[in-house]
Image (spheres, grey):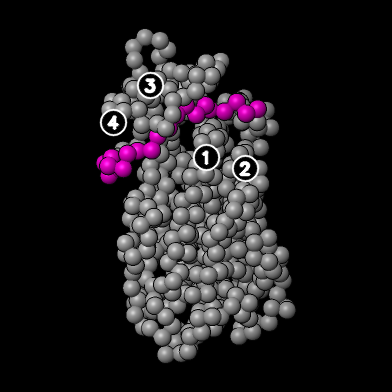
Amino acid sequence: MGAYNGDVSLAHLHNFSSYHDVRFFKHVHDNVHGNIYLDPLCLKFIDTEQFQRLRELKQLGLTNMVYPGAVHSRFEHSLGVYWLAGESVQMLKNCQGLELDINRFDFQTVKLAGLLHDVGHGPFSHLFEREFVPKVSAGSNWSHETMSVKMIDHIVNEHHIDIEPEMIKKVKEMILASSEHALPKASNEKRFLYDIVANGRNGIDVDKFDYIVRDSRACGLGCNFEFQRLMQTMRVLGDEICYRDNSHLTVHKLFATRADLYRTVYTHPKVKAIELMVIDALLKANAYLEISSHLDDPSDYWKLDDTIIRTIEISPDQELKESRDLILRIRRRNLYQFCNGYTVPKDKLENFKNVTAQDIVCSQKNGGVMLQEEDIAVTNVRIDLTRGRHNPLESIHFFQDYESEEKFCIPDDRISHLLPTSYQDMIVRVYSKKPELVEAVSEAFENFQLKTYGIKAQVHATPEKKKRRL
């Protein structure tokens, strides 16, 4: 076995001399990672209209309507993941290079996968994939990962990029590695390389390293998760990236910080209200603008980005009036009103079924305002530590020290009695699309909770002043 120096600093990660002289690379200065050096092959992909489109996709979709600083794009995130992917491979090469047989091909492939992993995202990122596509293409298995794979082929063909077919094949496999579309790999593959960009094995990957720090900073939130510590202690054992056992709390902090971002930023009640309105606007505009017709062909799809809202907003076409009115409501902050919400009781999670507008309508009492399904919006927000209701630490292997060849998992009771005993929350939130219906919707929602759980499960009642708003 080659000597392993567990104390290699991140300064050494910038030593690319094994393969390239970075003095001849172009570089950009990133506000998270400092100087990012762009190798010649990756530049061929970056300098295309398809990749530059990522500048017009906000990393956090519509979150900037609540957190004004969250205007960073998929472009800078992709550069960040490219950089950390390269740093990770360089770290492993510095420490275990001979043992792992890491070569120029591996180095370039992992960096390309990091660069291109999000090139298939649509307008407003996950909102497009999770809310819009299922409603316009029922039963479709469309995902941004599968579109990224198609887009890569399109870029290579369109721009005549000279790249080995085997490298492109592996780049696509690495991008799909954590998704349900993961491709089978040959038994002689360096399986650990697939853990770096999109880790389907345990969820620790450089994609999370970048967006957790980048998103926290953009939203003005503190972030005490230090990905550098994990990168310094990682080591390959049995073709799998493992971590020093004294880093287990840092690993837990990775997942806990991610969950906190979901709770306080990504699924903020006001953010969700705006997202619901934008989805309604896109659905109403779909037939006229034929948005869904772009889903399968990358030569059309790359033309879609966040500016579609501006296109609708300034269009004089009568066919877009309903969509235009919804966007105007967002501009004037006349949002769908959050009525109430609750966290599903822990003992009800296993058999939980998504709550629908129909459930709320069917729970209203006779007399008074008669609600319709189109008056109500419901979101069922799942927040977990990346492994559903399971503890993510159960899927991660650790090692004791750099002389040891043994890898092991760390059970809950050996970590801390202060860590959570549950690893998933399901939060149901109900919105009234019309301010004058808040009281009726809130009452119907309370009836639904009483009927379902025998209690009103929300933290507090809907404020009276909101109920009376006209």
- Density class for disc 3 (Cα within 10 Å; few <14, some 14-19, many ≥20) is many
Determine the CA span between mark 4 and mark 1. Answer: 25 Å
Which amino acid type is shown beneath numbered disc 3? Ala
Gap in angstroms between the C-alphas marked 3 and 1: 23 Å
Q: Mark 3 vs mark 4: give the one in front.
A: 4
Q: Which residue is mark 3?
A: 444
Instruction: Find out whether the residues at labels 3 and 1 contact each other: C-beta distance under 8 Å.
Output: no
Label 2 near label 3: C-beta < 8 Å? Answer: no
Name the one closer to the observer, 444 or 399: 399
Question: Residues at badges 1 and 2 in contact (C-beta under 8 Å)?
Answer: yes
User: Which badge, 4 or 1, comes first in the chain's sequence?
Assistant: 1
Split into 4 quadrants, where in the image is the N terminus?
A: bottom left
Q: Report if residue 73 is visible in the image.
A: no
Which residue is drawn at the image coordinates 48% and 85% (left, top)?
4
For label 4, the residue is: 453
- Residue 67's tag is 2
Q: For mark 1, what is the residue?
A: 268
Segment colored magenta: 332-351
**What amino acid is at disc 2?**
Tyr
**Mark 4 or mark 2, which is nearer to you?**
4
State the image coordinates of residue 26 (x, y, percent, origin top left): 72, 71
Against 455, residue 59 (above or below) is below
Percent of width and height locating residue 16: 63, 80
Q: How far is mark 3 from mark 4, CA to CA? A: 14 Å
What is the distance, in whole Å, between disc 3 and disc 2 at their CAs? Answer: 31 Å
